[in-house]
Image (cartoon, helix red, strand yellow):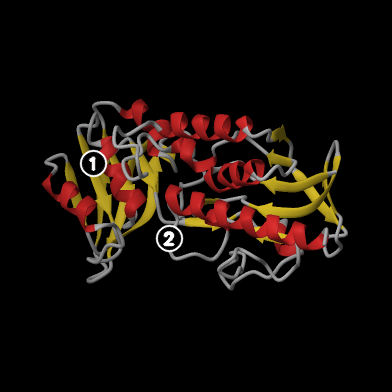
Amino acid sequence: MYDIVIIGGGAAGLSAAIYAGRSAMRTLVVEGTSLGGQVNLTYEVDNYPGFFDNPAGADLSENMKKHAAKFGTEFTTETVKSIVDFDQDIKTVVTRRNAYDTRAIIFATGANPRKLGVEGEDRFYGMGVSYCATCDGAFFKGQVTAVVGGGNTAFEDALYLARFCSKVYLIHRSENYRAAASLVGKAKADPKIELLTNRTVEQIIGDTTVKELRIKNVLDNTAETIACSGVFIAVGRIPETALAGKYVHLTRQGFIQTDRAMRTNVPGIFAAGDVRDTPLRQIVTAAADGAVAATSAIYYINELEG
C-alpha cells in the first residue's frame, strides 16, 4: 500500500515526490522511460532560480531524483496500463507486471512533440528530422540546419545549434513570436541565424538523409527551397493523456483539467506539469505544480484518515 503513486518522473513528478516524502508519505514514482522527462533533453538551464551557473538538464534532473530518493521515494520503470477503482478511496495502479494500491494518484506524464504533418517528416525521422536539438544537434556540426517554430523552444534550439552549425534558419508562419523578447533579440543578433517569417514548411526532401526544405510564403503563396542537412521541429507538444483521459476530464486540446490546487474532477487524483491545462510549460512551473499537487494529495489523505 502506497500513500501516493506518481505517474511520470519529470520535473513535476520528482518535485511532487520530494514534497510527499518530506511529509512521510510512502511514495512511488512510475516512469515508462527515463527519470527526468523533458529536462533531460535540455542542453542547459538558465532560468531555474538559484542555478545561475546554467546546469545541464540531465544534471538537474539527476539532482531532483537524488533529492526525492533522500526522502524515501521508490522508483520503478514501468508503463501504467489501467487504474482499477479509480473513484474509490483505495485505487490500484496496474502495469504489465505489477499492481500498486494507493490512496492518491498524481498524473505527471508530460507532453510529446507535435508533428508538422508534412511529406518527408516521418520518412526522414532520425535521418535529419529531429524534435530535440540538444539530443541530435551535435551530428550537424559545421552544417546548415533549420528550426521550425516561434516559441521559446524554437529560439533556444536555434541559439544552441548556432554554436556549432555553419548556419541556422528559423522558420515561422508569422511575424509574431511567442518566444521571450530576450531570446528573439539574441537570435536576431546572431550572424549565423536567419529568421524566415511568414513561411511554412511544405515538404522535407532528401535521399537517404535530409537535403532540402520546400517552404511556402503564406502572404503570396510563392514557394522556395532551402538547402539544409537537418530540420528541428519545435511547434508545441501533445499531452500524454491516453491513460488519464479514461478517468478524468480533459480540455478540448487534450490537457488535464485541474483547479488551482491541482485537483481533477475525481477525488484523490491530481495532475501536475505539462500534462495539465496551464499557460506556461517550463521546468520551474512543472516543479511548482508538483509541489502543489503533492500538498493537495497529502491534505486529501489526511482527510481520509480522519
Whichever of callouts 1 and 2 sits on the residue coming sooner in the sequence is 1
Q: Nearer the viewer, residue 167 or 208?
A: 167
- The amino acid at mark 2 is Leu
Answer with the quarter of the image where residue 228 lies: top left
Q: Decide if residue 70 is in sight here.
A: yes
Residue hosting label 1: 168
Using residue 214 as the reference point, say whether residue 5 is left or right of it.
right
Q: Percent from the top left, x then y, of residue 11?
A: 52, 44
Q: Residue at x 57, y 61 (%)?
A: 276
Q: Percent from the top left, x then y, of residue 213?
A: 32, 47
Q: CA distance from mark 1 to mark 2?
A: 26 Å
Q: Decide if residue 209 is in sight here.
A: no
Q: Nearer the viewer, residue 291 or 253?
A: 291
Q: Residue at x 43, y 50 (%)?
A: 284
Answer with the quarter of the image where residue 162 lies: top left
Q: Residue furthest front?
A: 306
User: Total label count?
Assistant: 2
Q: Percent from the top left, x then y, of residue 30?
A: 70, 40
Mark 1 is surrounded, within 10 Å at the Cα level, by few (under 14), some (14 to 19) or many (20 or more) other residues, namely many
Q: Nearer the viewer, residue 274 or 192?
A: 274
For label 1, the SS is strand
Up/down of 147 relative to 160, above or below: below
Mark 2 is surrounded, within 10 Å at the Cα level, by few (under 14), some (14 to 19) or many (20 or more) other residues, namely few
- The amino acid at mark 1 is Val
Using residue 297 as the reference point, say whether residue 55 is left or right of it.
left
For label 2, the SS is loop
Tag shown at residue 280: 2
